[in-house]
Amino acid sequence: MNLKDLYIDYFKKLDHKQIPSSPVVPENDPSVLFNTAGMQPLIPYLMGEAHPYGKRLVDYQKCIRTNDLDSVGDSTHHTFFEMLGNWSLGDYFKEESITYSFNFLTKVLNIPVDKLAVTVFKGNDLIDFDSVSYNKWVSLGIKPSRIAKTTLDNFWIAGETGPCGPDTEIFYFRGENVPEEFDLNDSRWVEIWNNVFMQYNKDASGNITELPKKNVDTGMGVERVTAILEGVDDNYLSSIFKDVISLISSISNLDYKGNEKSMRIIADHLRTAVFIAADPASIKPSNTDQGYILRRLIRRAIRHAKILNIDIQSNWEVLIATLILDKYKTYYKELEDNYQVVLDVITNEKIKFNRTLEKGLKEFNKVSDKDIDKTTAFHLYDTYGFPIELTIELANEKNLNVDVEGFNEMFKAHQELSRTASAGKFKGGLAGDSEVETKYHTATHLLNAALKKIVSDTVHQKGSNITTERMRFDFSCDHKLSDEEKLEVEKLVNKWIEDALEVEKLEMKKEDAIKSGAECMFIEKYPDIVSVYKIGDVSSELCGGPHVKNTSELGHFKIVKEEASSSGVRRIKAILE
Ligand code: SER
């Protein structure tokens, strides 16, 4: 069994329920582009909401982090990774959690106790030293010399606000002759697991208050721990990537040794692209938000394939993506369901970029006898499709600077939604659902219902995205809406708002929800017990919320744009005034 299976199996035996991985594009949080940690989809439950699966949960979660995308190419960085996690929502706490982790590592993975070390929270003005965790580790056989007490690294929070608490991190010694003292500065000690004891909430003004329940949130990175267990220093040589690397090596006819950087970038970026393209959010390469990241990843992979002299026009990308799809499809059904979509997205983007890549590189070589000014950077973007990050990467290789700020100004002037704004989202951390977003969320359900009534009962939601400024709704439909249809849809939504319909949340079994005719976009994504939001008798949808209590809170609904999104899918942008 591999690490993922062993982990799930172990915690299931300890009465944990396995929950499905959430999509990589968060469904109700427009402030972040991707899920960056296993706990992210669980925030409402850590804050106190009851989880339909109970108090003990376990999962493997798809995560994407793009903040250090440029570090990919070394032996440990990835843009996509899987995180194993187990949670106690007001059930067990520190001692049991530490015992579970210790037993998994030493009895299931058979790691010698002598190779382990831990950190515990030292205490500060607000929160005491975590003596419970310290004593538990000692009682399990971890020597005091292998326990570091620290403050800064041992308080975990995702972003600036939200559920948080002291944590205890577990480290593994990579190498022989384990030193007696655990030294955090010795890079041979690698962190493998983090157990967070989430009992606080931090609000925007920095106040720390107790959560209704004491929770445990643990996280373990699959890529890193797999490499450790297999005794390799390079994550790309573990069973997770080894076959992908060999394939790239055989396609390019080159050895991995000496070509590590480009091969790792291709393997990592195509794996992430596969998961983004397969996500239920139906992301396509574009110039904003998740679509831009997808574009950047594919284009960067192509540039590195070129460095390896791979014939870009051959089907190299299909071979690699197919291998990745096949490796993961038993764990993630969306890969099976969207198999062809994923291959098409990657190939189409390749074809698009390949048309201008060669000329763009020639142009770059022509102008790169000096630093790259804003006009040149913008020209490379606009005419040759070079994401600014590609220009920066090429410039770095020649020790040149790029006027990024100037580029951003020009870019802003040319785009409705600037890239800078979307880059800002990575830093955003976890935002609470603001009032406005909650209203848009409810308006989305009304729009969905109105489209079914006015346009066709075959209309189905294909995606949705909410910001504080507007809502965007993608739906299946074979034609451009006529002005009359748009007007009628608008009228109906506004009528429902005026009718002051009550919004009710019901909990029911998934089958019952489906039987009752509740609208549902991705059935396999939902647990067995689901929440259904019912709006008067006009709409009933499976949904995690949140929603307003009454439609009268919404104001006036207005469609500002209706356009094609992709083949057979239309997109409406609308606002509440
Ligand atoms: N939230 C913690 C982490 O991401 C443990 O899951 O490390």
Image (cartoon, helix red, strand yellow):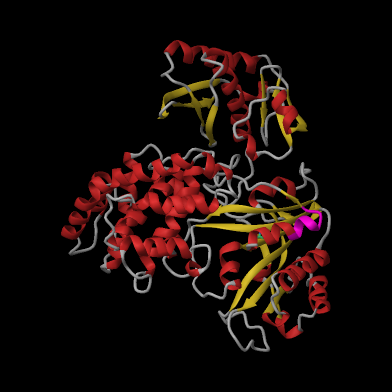
In this view, the residue in front, 160 or 113, is 113
Instruction: Where is residue 304? Give x, y as percent.
Output: 33, 60
Q: In the rendered view, does 9 fall on the left or right side of 369?
A: right
Marker count (numbered) = 0
* Residue under the point 38% across and 64% down: 263
* Residue under the point 44% across and 20% down: 478
Classify 313 as above or below 476: below
Q: Is residue 402 visible?
A: yes
In this view, the residue in front, 548 or 313, is 313
In this view, the residue in front, 142 or 379, is 142
* Residue under the point 19% across and 51% down: 359
> In the rendered view of the protein, which quadrant contains the N terminus?
bottom right
Instruction: Where is residue 492? Give x, y as percent.
Output: 58, 13
Q: Which residues are magenta?
A: 10-16
* Residue under the point 31% across and 62% down: 252
Magenta residue check for 13: yes
In this view, the residue in front, 403 or 310, is 310
Asked where in the image residue 30 lies, by quadrant, the reply is: top right
Magenta residue check for 517: no
Q: Residue furthest left?
A: 366
Q: Quadrant of ligand 1?
A: bottom right
Instruction: Where is residue 96? Give x, y as percent.
Output: 82, 64
Instruction: Where is residue 453? Give x, y as percent.
Output: 57, 14
Q: In the rendered view, does 461 fall on the left or right side of 110?
A: left
> In the rendered view of the protein, which quadrant contains the C terminus?
top right
Q: Is residue 285 visible?
A: no
